[in-house]
Image (cartoon, grey):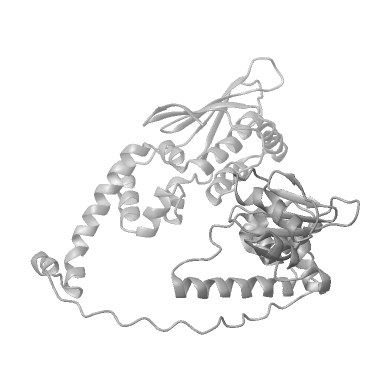
Amino acid sequence: MITARDDRRRTFAALPAGAEAATWWGRAWTASLERAAPDAARMERGRAYAAEGHVEAVTVTPGRIVAYVRGSRARPYRTELGLGVLSDAEWEELLEAVAADPAALAALLEREVPQVLAESVLPGPGELLPRCSCPDTGRPPCKHAAALCHRAARLFDEDPFALLLLRGRGERELTAELARRNAAHAARERPAAAAGFPGVPARAALARTVLPPLPAPAAAPAAPAVPPGWPHDPAIPGAPDPLALDQLAADAAARALALLATGEDPFGGLSLWQDAVRLASAHHTAGLTGPARTLYRELARATGRTTTDLARAAAAWRQGGPAGLAALEEPWDPPAGPFDRARPALLAAAQGSFRPERNRLTCTTRQLRLGRDGLWYAYESRPGAEDWWPTGTPSPDPVSALAG
């Protein structure tokens, strides 16, 4: 925002068109000119000029704000607002008041104007003196000066130190002086604080001491507690389903118990999709209740999948956990060995002739998939359809996996 800077001369780039002052000190600044303005219509036109972005770069120096304001003519008008600077005695009183008040000092350093400075830095009635090079011969302020006043209020919103500069002191000298005074106040207050809180010699603080052993940790509960129910208010649009929340809370409690007992989260390394499949796997699609259907729908939407994708993946998770899900979703090329011996074994067991494709063996409506964990996972499909669903229990023996 600042395009040039000297501690007692600062130039701010033109602010974008838009809203008026939002802070209490920005609005108070504008009100000071509006109270003295004889023509409310001019002030309203100035407000519109400011909102439309007619005010160009603004320069602030002690006692003066200057900017060029575009009007109806091609050449912009030189417009300024004058305000008297504070005397050294007034600055002394102001700085001492801020340094002695931690809340006021913190507010100023957070670029807010503390209320304790309101009477000192904000202009009083008739203090703000507008001037403009426009041909308006009426009593000031003209609409260009009013526009500058509104834009200055926005500027002070973002940087209150510009307001203090207008009153005569730059930001660097102010912060340095406030730091010095604040340190002096702290030094004066330190003896009183030390009397109430006696110090400890460094030698004693660093001396080796024997600490008593920590008490034994409490035993972990045998089972997670039932989480409290979530009240359901149908009048709240978009409120989450309370039973789905209950399920998630119960799962979180079980994971917390496992973490407490073992020091590890058994599901901490899962991806979003894997965790959604894990949660859905607790509910068989053959008997889904209303809350379980809601859970499936929400999990599918959160992962960008369909409920059918989720149901199939949940069946694979029930079949073999993360390895079962990988067998469903990740075809791979197994090395020679167990995969090559599986076909003759199936043929010898009168299971039929299976067609190999990568890690899969298929015979009409039955299929076996060799997982990276060395287990065989059985699948079934409807006749004439490539709609494979996990079935049975995985086994290192293909014949047992198919029979299971």
- Residue depicted at 19% across the width and 61% down the height: 188
Q: Nearer the viewer, residue 8 or 358?
A: 358
Would you say 202 lies left or right of 340 here? left
The quadrant in which residue 280 appears is bottom right
Residue at the outermost front position:
348
Apparent side of residue 393 relative to residue 167 in the rendered image (left or right): right
Q: In the rendering, at what x and y percent does residue 362 appear?
A: 78, 51
Q: Quadrant of residue 269?
A: bottom right
Residue at figure coordinates x 73%, y 63% from the top left? 315
Pick the front one: 60 or 89: 60
In this rendering, the answer to whether 196 lies above or below 169 is below
Q: How many marks?
A: 0
The percent coordinates of residue 102 (x first, y second) are: 35, 59
Horizontal side of residue 233 vs 275, given as left or right: right
Among all residues in the image, which is located at the extreme right? 384
In the displayed structure, 218 sits above or below 271; it is: below
Q: Is residue 301 visible?
A: no
In depth, the one of 234 and 52 nearer the eye is: 234
Q: Position of residue 133 (x, y in %)?
A: 59, 21
Residue lying at 70% horizontally and 56% vertically, measured from the top left = 345
Quadrant of the snapshot with the C terminus = bottom right
